[in-house]
């Protein structure tokens, strides 16, 4: 699960889609061919022959292998409804914010005398728009899952642990590790 955070962000944005993405292999292949303006580029992207792509387009082949079906679905969803995707991201980054639902081990670095022991916590926290913007910008820039996790940890530190500056002002760092579950919602 190396891309849990990036996949979670993508899934949150996909909830904003107004129409379902194509389901059949032929429809998915036709969509990709139209988007990428040719069968050769689709074939290279999916690591199959150009003839195979053409056969899917003509519905001569209907059932792809499991690995090809997964790549096909991932590539279609990555390109599906780009304007809707952009609007959802912009809204989250400007006014809506993002909700993070996670079950993970969390602890923090604090002054001596406080209990900073890591423990498993299940949190559902609404992060403000600036954290949504930072998460989406980092994802667009190709940030690793660790970098996205750090941004989420900063957001949890500010909103959950420090309650917007009303408590735990001396808190230095939040450790956000051993993620069992992560889900985002806009």
Image (spheres, rainbow, N blue to C red):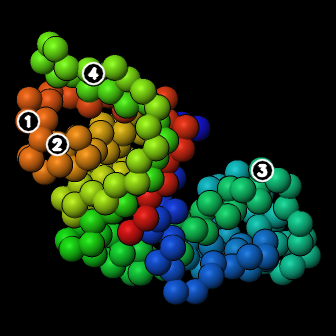
Where in the figure is residue 69, as x and y percent of width and height? 77, 59
Please give the residue where the numbered disc 1 appears in the rendered image: 169
Looking at the rendered structure, the secondary structure element under dot 2 is loop
**Disc 3 from disc 2: Cα separation:** 45 Å
3 vs 2, front mark = 2
Please give the residue where the numbered disc 3 appears in the rendered image: 67
- Residue contact at pointers 4 and 3, CB within 8 angstroms: no
In the picture as drawn, the residue positioned furthest to the top comes out as 112
4 vs 3, front mark = 4
**Disc 1 from disc 3: Cα separation:** 49 Å
Please give the residue where the numbered disc 2 appears in the rendered image: 162
- Residue contact at pointers 2 and 1, CB within 8 angstroms: yes
Q: Is residue 42 left or right of residue 152?
A: right
Label 1 packing within 10 angstroms: few (<14), some (14-19), many (20+): few
Label 3 packing within 10 angstroms: few (<14), some (14-19), many (20+): few
| Residue at 23% in and 41% down | 161
- Nearer the observer, 94 or 82: 94
Looking at the rendered structure, the secondary structure element under dot 3 is helix
Looking at the rendered structure, the secondary structure element under dot 1 is loop
Q: Going from the N terminus, do you reach mark 2 or mark 1 first? A: 2
Please give the residue where the numbered disc 4 appears in the rendered image: 116
């Amino acid at each position: 699960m190396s891309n849990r955070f990036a996949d979670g962000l993508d899934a949150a944005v996909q909830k904003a889609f107004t129409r379902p993405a194509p389901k059949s292999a032929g429809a998915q292949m036709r969509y990709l061919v139209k988007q990428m303006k040719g069968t050769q580029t689709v074939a290279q992207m999916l690591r199959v022959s150009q003839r195979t792509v053409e056969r899917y387009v003509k519905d001569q082949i209907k059932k792809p292998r499991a690995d090809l079906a997964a790549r096909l679905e991932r590539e279609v969803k990555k390109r599906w409804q780009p304007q809707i995707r952009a609007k959802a991201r912009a809204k989250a980054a400007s006014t809506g914010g993002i909700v993070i639902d996670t079950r993970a081990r969390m602890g923090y670095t604090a002054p001596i005398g406080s209990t900073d022991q890591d423990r498993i916590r299940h949190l559902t926290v609404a992060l403000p728009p600036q954290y949504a913007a930072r998460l989406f910008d980092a994802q667009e820039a190709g940030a690793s899952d660790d970098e996205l996790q750090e941004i989420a940890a900063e957001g949890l530190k500010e909103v959950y642990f420090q309650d917007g500056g009303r408590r735990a002002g001396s808190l230095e760092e939040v450790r956000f590790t051993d993620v069992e579950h992560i889900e985002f919602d806009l």
